[in-house]
Image: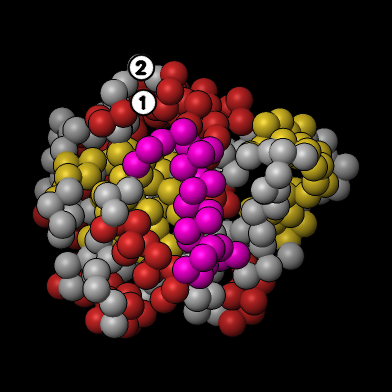
Amino acid sequence: MKTIQLSNGVEMPILGFGTYQITDPIEAEQAVITAIQAGYRLIDTAQIYLNEAAVGQAITKAGVDRKDLFITTKIWIENMSYDGVMQSFRQSMERLGLDYLDLLLIHQPYNDVYGAWRAMEELYEQGKIRAIGISNFSVDRAVDLAIFNKITPHINQIEINPFQQQATAIQALCDEGIMPQAWAPFAEGKNGIFHHPTLTTIAIKYGKSVAQVILRWLVQQDIIVLAKSVNPTRMAENIAIFDFELTTEDIAAIATLDVGESQFFSHSDPERIKWISTLTMNIPLTTESRCYLYSFDYSTGVRHSGIFFVFGTGVRHSCFFNVLPPTKI
Ligand SMILES: NC(=O)c1ccc[n+]([C@@H]2O[C@H](COP(=O)([O-])OP(=O)(O)OC[C@H]3O[C@@H](n4cnc5c(N)ncnc54)[C@H](OP(=O)(O)O)[C@@H]3O)[C@@H](O)[C@H]2O)c1
């Protein structure tokens, strides 16, 4: 696997496996085991994905040396303060079953990100984390955080896909020594991306899939990318992108697909900020069990009905029953 060097010298795999929306613990554990066995070494989770414990189980069972893996998790908004990071980082590490982390990110640019960053700097300097970064920060807020603190973020994980290419932001981040990382490279399938005629024409030319063309387009620009799939065939497909090269004409054709706006929502929309900041992890700090009736897809604002059982340190079992249709909030 090709790697990218971060500004502190740490080498990071250029292509990783994303675990967003894989909340069922059995499915999450199996998906991560299959991904590691397929060759993925970078695994991306987050406190709010409620699957850190399952990812931890998979890391133990996958049969690959810990030092050969690169594990990322992210601090959720409710834990965004100095004390919140210190406490919730310990809990994340317990759930993941790790004694060091490769990358810790501020998940969203809200709440006390300065206090959170100072805690992350301390954990980094203590050697508990190999790299620290941010996610969903606009360039101005990333620069502001960098210049008033000791450590410039090593990464900014942002939405990048053919419809939201972010060329200006990517250049500006690179100029600051902040490596951009792409989430939702497939725009989660929105707007018919897997059947887009321009992408399909390029894919046919190389005997590849549209998904492979998109991932190749990103790694060829040295952008670290996360792809998510629970399907073993697609996991293998998504990692088989190192045996072909796009031409400058292909890249110019893909450039025309940019619509210059998020396929999900703007992180600077006041109503979205108010709404997303109400979402909590609902993970109890004690060993008591709890049961919840809803879960939220916080990027789309869709509420799913179901029963979610939580025991102690993470979701252990979820059982979906569609009494209510998903609701846009
Ligand atoms: N920092 C943030 O705020 C943030 C936000 C969103 C995501 N992320 C991270 O980035 C990762 C990737 O983003 P994402 O999961 O939102 O979306 P994505 O990777 O753009 O799209 C995932 C969707 O594409 C499908 N898919 C995957 N490979 C495919 C293929 N070869 N052919 C056809 N369909 C395919 C998957 O379905 P199947 O699973 O059925 O294959 C899934 O529905 C996440 O998992 C997460 O780790 C971070």
Task: Say which quadrant the C terminus sits in.
Answer: bottom right
Task: Determine if residue 235 is in view.
Answer: yes
Residue extending furthest toward the right: 323
Can you identify the residue that label 2 sits on? 63
Task: Say which quadrant the N terminus sits in.
Answer: top left
Q: Earlier in the sequence, mark 2 or mark 1?
A: 1
Q: Give SS at disc 1.
A: helix
Label number found at residue 253: none
Task: Determine if residue 165 is in view.
Answer: no
Can you identify the residue that label 1 sits on? 36
Whole-Å distance between the Cαs marked 2 and 1?
9 Å
Residue extending furthest toward the front: 126
Disc 2, disc 1: CB below 8 Å?
yes
Magenta residue span: 77-100
The residue positioned 35% from the left and 44% from the top of the image is 101
Within 10 Å of disc 1 (Cα), the crowding (few <14, some 14-19, many 20+) is: many
State whether the magenta stretch is mostly helix, strand or loop.
helix
Tell me: 176 left or right of 131.
left
Tell me: 324 left or right of 28.
right
Tell me: 35 left or right of 84.
left
Q: Amino acid at mark 2?
A: Gly
